[in-house]
Every structure is written in structure tokens, then in C-alpha cells.
Image (cartoon, rainbow, N blue to C red):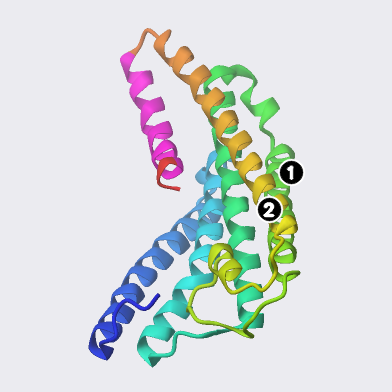
Amino acid sequence: MEFSDSKQLQVLQGFLFLLIYLVSLMGNLLIIMLVTVDQCLHTPMYFFLKNLSFVDVCLISVTVPKLILSSLSHRSTTSFPGCVCQVFFVVFFIETEISILTAMSYNHYVAICYLLHYDAIMDRTVCVKMVAASWLFGIVFGFLYSYGTFSLSFCSSEHCHSSCDVPSLLKISCSMMHADIDISVNAGVLYGFLCSVSIGFSYVYILNTVLRMPLSQGRSKIFSTCIPHLIVIQDF
């Protein structure tokens, strides 16, 4: 829904979100550039972080520029094909990000609980396969959500908002049965739940290992690595 009917407030909103978008964009691109250029950062943890930053850039670029453009031009409608693309890419990048966050938790688990075997377990091939699987899961769920949503019949050829999402699209659907999208949503919820359980188990083992460590300095280093990851998961 529009933030306000006032054109002045819409312009203010557009510039505010433009500033936030540029800051987020520059921050993530800086992370990607530093990890790529600095040879010391060519480790599994930073490899996952670089991919996570790239996904963040893609995710915010799907909806925020359209929101900014709508606020500045005072036009909030989105075409039906635009809605199809937006739903696909939003779900695609969200599921990919969840998968990468899960892979990062497993990386922390191996690095802390199996330190001596870390290099053998988390080699580059394994890391690439985990990231590739994350992108694959994203594509699968993006297709499922898009197909489930747009296989329905709609009473209008245009969506009245600058940002398309599945619940609001269902409100303008003429179809009484939503079996396909219900299956897709349940599959997505189940996958998210399994990822959350996997992350939870990883940090239970990590906490158990950390509490048995005699040196407080080692504990503080581990916490400084894991806490930012947990904050991202909680915010997500």
C-alpha cells in the first residue's frame, strides 16, 4: 500500500529508501570486493560470506528500486508479467539465503568441533557444492511458488501495489481452490523449519564444545565469529 497520498511525502520516502538502498548496496559490494581481492580471505567462511552478500544485493534489488521509482513517479501499479518475475526472484533469493546461512552454520560447527579435520572436511569442492545446492534449492522453490501462484486465474490483469507478494495476489484471484500454492507454501515452510533445526543443532554442539574450553580468549574469538551469524538469522 502507498505510504501516503501526499506527493511530497512520497518523494521523501523515495529518497529515504534510495539512501538506505545505496548504503546496503555499497556495503555488500565492498565485502564482495575485499573477499575477492584479499588472498588471506580465501577461506570457506569468507567464501560463504561473499555469496551471502551477493544474494543480499540481488534480493534488495528485486523490490526496492521499484519501490523507489514508484514513490518518485507517483505510480504504484505493477504489470502482471512484472509480478511473475518479482515473486519468482524474491522467493528464489530468500530460499538461497536461508540455505547459505545453514551452510555457514555447518561450517562453524566443523571449524569448532572438528578443528583438526576442518581442512579435509571443508575443502573448496565441498564449499562450491554447498553453495551450488543453495542456488538450486532457490530455483526450485522460486519455480514452485511462481507456478502455484500464477496457475490461478485472476480477476485483474494488473496488481495495485508496487511490490507483489503471494498473499496479496491470492486476494485478487478468482480461483476458489489454491491447492498448488498451498503445497508450495507448505514445502517452503517445511524446508525453512529443517534449516532452522539444522542451525539449532549446529549451535548446540558448538556451545557444548565452547563451554568445555579452558581458555576464555578462545571462547571470545568463537563468540565474535558466531554471534553476528546468529543475529543475521534472527533478523531474517
Could you say where residue 221 lies in the image, as x and y percent from the top left?
A: 37, 27
Q: Quadrant of the N terminus?
A: bottom left
Residue at 66% across, 46% down: 186
Number of numbered discs present? 2
From the viewer's perspective, is 207 left or right of 165?
left
Tag nearer the camera, 2 or 1: 2
Q: Is residue 65 magenta?
A: no
The local secondary structure at tag 2 comes to helix
Q: Is residue 220 magenta?
A: yes
Q: Is residue 83 above or below residue 189?
A: below
Q: CA distance from mark 2 to mark 1?
A: 30 Å
Along the line of sight, the residue nearer the viewer: 74 or 217: 74
Q: Is residue 87 above or below residue 118?
A: below
Q: Which residues are magenta?
A: 216-233
The local secondary structure at tag 1 comes to helix
Q: Amino acid at mark 2?
A: Asp
Along the line of sight, the residue nearer the viewer: 70 or 112: 70
Could you say where residue 24 lies in the image, as x and y percent from the top left?
A: 39, 64
Along the line of sight, the residue nearer the viewer: 194 or 175: 175
Residue at 48% across, 79% down: 66
Q: Give the number of the disc on residue 182.
A: 2
Q: Main secondary structure of the magenta part?
A: helix
User: Which of the 4 image quadrants contains residue 4?
Assistant: bottom left
